[in-house]
Image (tube, rainbow, N blue to C red):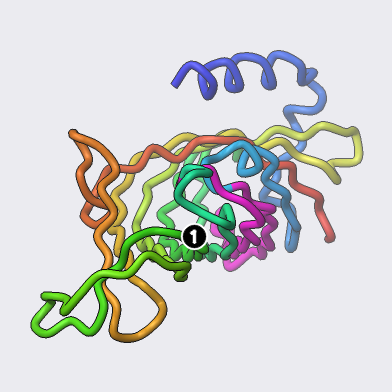
Amino acid sequence: MKRIVLLFMAFPSCISAQFLRLPFTETKTAISLNPFTLAEIDYTIMAGFEYRLACKLYMSHEAGYIFASRYVADGESNSNGTGFIIRPSVKWFVSENDRFYLQPQVFYKQVTHTMYDWVGKNPVNGVPAYEQLQDFKYRRKITGFNMVAGFVSPIDRKAKGFIDVYFGLGVRNKKSLVVEPNMVYERQVGIFNPTDDGVFPSVPMGLRIIYVIN
């Protein structure tokens, strides 16, 4: 929360009154880069593409490559994880100055870790016949919905570059599984969050750098 408040305070104050008269809604198509996803628990290179559907209404597509992860501890995993995320959304500018917007978005994320642990083998009705210590692939699948609010400001006089600061609330559903067949595995992660699976709240926040194509 502190991070997003500081972003909202810092960036608009650095934009001159002349820049603030340059509306983003004159843009037809644009591309974006989200540097804050490099600091999340799943290290992600995230980029996006936006195009105008109607006055004040844009379609946005974001996708990212997850090249590393801190989700699984080093002692549990031989590989810190790789995967991807896709996040389509609609951006609707609601203010008269075309700066503030609302953005409902859905997302799907998949991350695969190479683990070394005890796994159940040849299960019948979920009960394994025996356990074996070995390497295996452990995959997390996350789907969810967010409602995001944001603020867009130009950063150059030609209105080719914009800063997009956003904050939101949402919900995500997490499901984990062993990729290999005939294995079962339940990872215990803590007292207050004893399983990887379930429905959890989300608090998306961050900053996008937008470049206008036309």
Residue 59 covered by magenta stretch = yes
- 6 relative to 132 in the view: left or right: right
Work out which quarter of the rendered image holds the C terminus and state it. Answer: bottom right
Most common SS among magenta residues: strand
- 191 relative to 53 in the view: left or right: left
- 184 relative to 44 in the view: left or right: left
Q: Which residue is mark 1?
A: 90
Measured along the vertical axis of the image, is residue 122 above or below residue 116?
A: below
Which residue is farthest right?
158
Say which amino acid is labelled 1.
Answer: Val
Work out which quarter of the rendered image holds the N terminus and state it. Answer: top left
Residue beneath the point at 11% across and 75% down: 127
Residue 178 covered by magenta stretch = no
Residue 150: percent from the left, percent from the top? 52, 37
Residue 98: percent from the left, percent from the top? 60, 40
Residue beneath the point at 61% across and 43% down: 37
SS at mark 1?
strand
For the record, the magenta segment spans 43-72
Answer with the quarter of the image where residue 79 lies: bottom right
Between residues 173 and 61, which one lies in front from this camera angle?
173
Answer with the quarter of the image where residue 161 lies: top right
Measured along the vertical axis of the image, is residue 65 above or below residue 95?
A: below
Count of labels shown?
Answer: 1
Answer with the quarter of the image where residue 17 lies: top right
Between residues 50 and 87, which one lies in front from this camera angle?
87
- Classify mark 1: residues with Cα within 10 Å, few (<14), some (14-19) or many (20+): many
- 179 relative to 42 in the view: left or right: left
Residue beneath the point at 71% across and 35% down: 163
Residue 199: percent from the left, percent from the top? 22, 53
Residue beneath the point at 50% across and 65% down: 112
